[in-house]
Amino acid sequence: MKIATIVGARPQFIKASCLSREIQNEKNITEVIIHTGQHFSESMSNSFFDKLNIPEPKYNLDIHSLSHGAMTGRMIEKIEDVLIKEKPNVVVVYGDTNSTLAGALASIKLHIPIAHIEAGLRSYNMNMPEEINRILTDHISTVLFCPTESSKEILMKENIQKNGIVVGDIMYDAFLYESRKIINDKITPSNYFLLTIHREENTNDFQKLINLFSTLTESSKKYNCEIIFPVHPRVINLFKKNNFLDTDFDRIHFIDPQGYIEMLILEKNAKLILTDSGGLQKEAYWSKVPCITLREETEWIELQECGINIVTGLNEQKINDAIKYFLSNDVVFPEGLYGIGNTSKNILEILKFMFGCVS
């Protein structure tokens, strides 16, 4: 049995590492990793393969820094060439990036089964490229691996009635596996908020970021906290374009993008996490740290319903209210929202059963 795994962005490397470890224990399964190149810097890509022990990609398509249409189109073209050559039994795609959609479209045109990991998530915001990618991928996939019951229910409502399977969240597998490597997690400063921001809708307006920094600086003074901000390459480009000087905000520590374990350490020690990342919302939950989501909606509705994640967008008053709430109240983190950490095993067993490798 041959599995083609298509990845291109940092969260996909993390998720793929779990399934790759399971595949390596199987004598009769070959994995061909195709890296589209969507995340191409050392900090966002290459170092992750080394640190997560992911096998070296057999193909690196080196496609990046293009418009959504151009990027997706070139990915489809190059992925198709690889799939024709490799002839996999199934193609595995993750999440909601341009790489996800391109891999799914190239596969279905060649009549190759598609397995979508992290299926059934919806923000209902069609201005997000990720929302378009995930909807289209779900509707053409052969088997849909859902992290929660609610994500499967969403598929059912969209009349995707077949092969939606709840397996848990594969990122929890990664979180547990990598957390075991943390030996000394003491960092300085120890009293801080962790900030990440990278989504297009939040980084297309320089003034939005300045307003956010001003809001968080005032809150950090009020609560005597620092702010640690690993800066995404998209934000770095915005800074350069606007001649931004990070010295204007002395309570914000602007640092380079971090490796996965380094980010876990930052998360586990934070007083609060403020982010527009979907994955970081869940890691905040697993780290038992309250989360403020800097978007107008979240796919992870379970976290919002439990009161451990407050959605604020970039609204100054909402952010201030959420910070005050979390720092003034005891927050209870329920167990087991996203499985028990055996998602990758579940997925591989199902792939073996469905695509001709039953032990």
Image: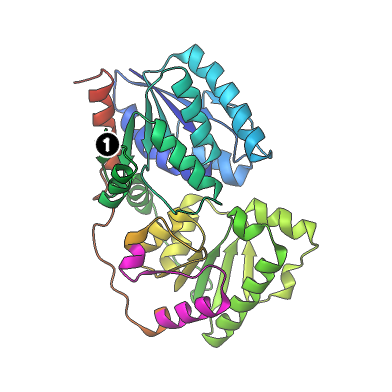
x 40%, y 19%: residue: 112
Q: In the rendering, at what x and y percent does residue 226 appear?
A: 56, 76
Residue 356 is drawn in which quadrant? Answer: top left
* Residue 46, visible in the rendered structure: yes
Say if 107 sits above or below 7 in the image: above
Residue nearer the viewer, 33 or 87: 87
Query: Which element carries disc 1, helix, strand or loop?
Result: loop
Q: Which residues are magenta?
A: 303-325
Q: In the rendering, at what x and y percent does residue 165 appear?
A: 26, 39
Q: Which residue is mark 1?
A: 161
Residue nearer the viewer, 23 or 183: 23
Instruction: Please name the amino acid that badge 1 sits on.
Output: Gln
Q: How is the image coloured?
A: rainbow
x 77%, y 65%: residue: 244
* Residue 287, visible in the rendered structure: no
x 28%, y 52%: residue: 150
- 340 left or right, relative to 325: left
Q: In which quadrant of the rendered image does the C terminus lie?
A: top left
Residue 221 is drawn in which quadrant? Answer: bottom right
Q: How many marks?
A: 1
Residue nearer the viewer, 136 or 198: 136
Residue 306 among those drawn in magenta: yes
Q: In the rendering, at what x and y percent does residue 177 appear?
A: 34, 47
- 106 left or right, relative to 205: left
Residue 70 among those drawn in magenta: no
Say if 335 sits above or below 94 in the image: below
x 69%, y 70%: residue: 210
Residue nearer the viewer, 195 or 70: 70
Q: In the rendering, at what x and y percent does residue 282 appear?
A: 38, 57
- 232 left or right, relative to 240: left
Identity of the residue furthest to the bottom in this view? 222
Q: In which quadrant of the rendered image does the N terminus lie?
A: top left
